[in-house]
Amino acid sequence: MKAHLSRRYLFSASHRLHSAAMSEDENRATYGKCNNPYGHGHNYTLEVTVSGQVEPSTGMVCNLVDLDTFVEKEVLSRYDLQNLNHTQEFAVTVPTTENLCIQIFEIMQRGFSQAHLERVRLEETMMNSFEYAGGQEDGKRN
Amino acid sequence: MVYLTRKAEFSASHYYNNPDFSVEENRRIFGKCNNPNGHGHNYTLEVTVKGEVDSRSGFVVDLKQLKEVMHREVLDAMDHRFLNKEVPEFVTKIPTTENIAIAVWQRLEPKLKQAQLHRVRVYETPDLFVDFYGEE
């Protein structure tokens, strides 16, 4: 029997939305307050959904300890209490929550093999959330 | 097609143990959840049904009926119970959140008349939940 398991995690990070492909005026018009040169921060909530057959001997889709350990090591320790613009992946790519969501999906997909990755959902605030479930087209936006 | 979701809460205790595993294996795989005296959670159950809106009533399903079925089939059996000892499914199956979601589906699905069951979501804590969409 196939089930979907979702786990939620918290991390806090700062970012500035600014694209080198746009003029200063365009950046201000596009990103508004988020273009503030000193950056600003959010408490992000990350929701990871994996799926798979429920293993009869354990009753589990995957061991939660394995999922937590992977997310802690590969995602939370990478982004928690960091300035996203200073990470390698967002040196050029704008660290919008869309792009961060895609990045986390790709980290999970590359490294987490204990269950099928269904979806990554990222809440930037209580009012905004973004989801990425992979896709054939390149979802990246620079 | 319209989807309707009804929430309910129940509190229960459980522990994880597979008699086919050794004591050490059980402890390694299930960690703290292997404590034979059990521990408890406040579970939140979300039952989503789907159907066309009835033109006379404007309903997908009679909520009162859905609530009654959820109470009779799930809450009466699981609320304030030790799942391993008091709920028949979990005498043989380990009462993980995955298996609870499956058991809730199997209890509700044959009893729902009007609407079709779409999803059962069980939150063990606000940070951990399982969705079951029926056998795939």
Image: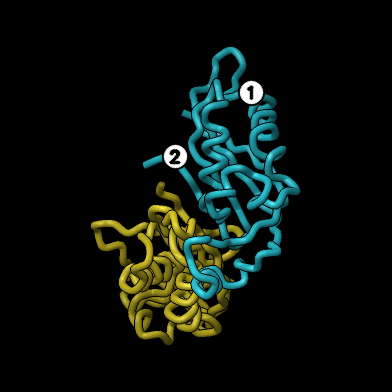
Chain colours: A yellow, B cyan
Marks 2 and 1, the one that precedes in the sequence: 1
Which residue carries the number 2 mark? B134
Residue beneath the point at 53% across and 25% down: B115
Q: Position of residue A38 (x, y in %)?
A: 53, 85
Chain letter of disc 1 in the image: B
Mark 1 Cα shell of 10 Å, populated few (<14), some (14-19), many (≥20): few
Q: How many marks?
A: 2
Residue beneath the point at 43% across and 87% down: A86
Which residue carries the number 1 mark? B62
Q: Amino acid at mark 1?
A: Asp
Q: Position of residue A26 (x, y in %)?
A: 40, 70
Can I make out residue A33 in this image? no
Q: CA distance from mark 2 to mark 1?
A: 22 Å
Can I make out residue B23 in this image? yes
Regarding mark 1 in the picture, which secondary structure is present there? Answer: loop
Which residue ends up furthest to the right in the rendered image?
B80
Chain letter of disc 2 in the image: B
**Do callouts 2 and 1 point to residues on the same chain?**
yes
Q: Amino acid at mark 2?
A: Gly
Regarding mark 2 in the picture, which secondary structure is present there? Answer: loop
